[in-house]
Amino acid sequence: QVRLVESGGGAVQAGGSLRLSCAASGPTFILAAMGWFRQAPGKEREFVAAIGRSGGNTNYADSVKGRFTISRDNAKSTVYLQMNSLKPEDTAVYYCNAPPLGASPGTYWGQGTQVTVSS
């Protein structure tokens, strides 16, 4: 059973930065790509970013391009989301997901971590 555990959420003022981590355990060899999604109150869950197995192939939602960076450390089975220049509209619960296909989620989800950006 694959398990994904997020950490690193919190509260920050607009313009600030946070780094989220997602540690994967279980048969992680099946996880080619990994990604991040988010869900704001009253809204549907949406794609944020994804990264391929090697880390050389990344994909971002237009709303976060140039501000967020996804990366991974395969030796630690961990994926990261560095979030800079945060805006109030980035406030959401952020979920780790694997393995995404393009901007569509895959089977496995983490429990989510709250990110709150105040103006």
Image: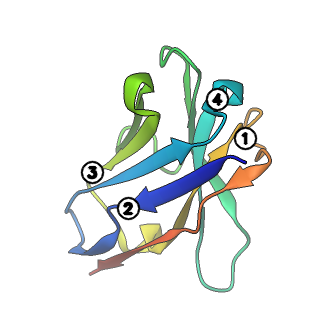
Looking at the image, tell me whether mark 1 or mark 2 is earlier in sequence order. Answer: 2
Residue that mark 3 sits on: 84
Vertical position of residue 34 compared to residue 87: above or below: above
Q: Position of residue 22 (x, y in %)?
A: 46, 49
Mark 4 against mark 3, which lies toward the viewer? 4
Amino acid type, residue under disc 1 in the picture = Ala
Name the residue at the bottom extreme: 42
| Residue 81 in which image quadrant | top left
Q: Position of residue 9 (x, y in %)?
A: 35, 68
Q: Tell whether label 2 touches label 4 (CB within 8 Å).
A: no
Looking at the image, tell me whether mark 1 or mark 4 is earlier in sequence order. Answer: 4
Residue that mark 2 sits on: 7
Looking at the image, tell me whether mark 3 or mark 2 is earlier in sequence order. Answer: 2
Amino acid type, residue under disc 3 in the picture = Asn
Q: Is residue 40 left or right of residue 105?
A: left
Q: Tell whether label 3 touches label 4 (CB within 8 Å).
A: no
In the rendered image, the quadrant that contains the C terminus is: bottom left
Q: Is residue 61 visible?
A: no
Vertical position of residue 84 compared to residue 43: above or below: above
Amino acid type, residue under disc 4 in the picture = Ala
Amino acid type, residue under disc 2 in the picture = Ser
Q: Is residue 28 left or right of residue 65?
A: right
Looking at the image, tell me whether mark 4 or mark 3 is earlier in sequence order. Answer: 4
Q: Position of residue 34 (x, y in %)?
A: 60, 36
- Using the image as rendered, state which of residue 92 and residue 34 is in the foreground: 34
Residue that mark 4 sits on: 33
Alpha carbon separation for disc pair 3 and 2? 17 Å
Q: Is residue 106 left or right of residue 31?
A: right
Disc sitting over residue 103 in the figure: 1
Q: Residue at x 67, y 59 (%)?
A: 46
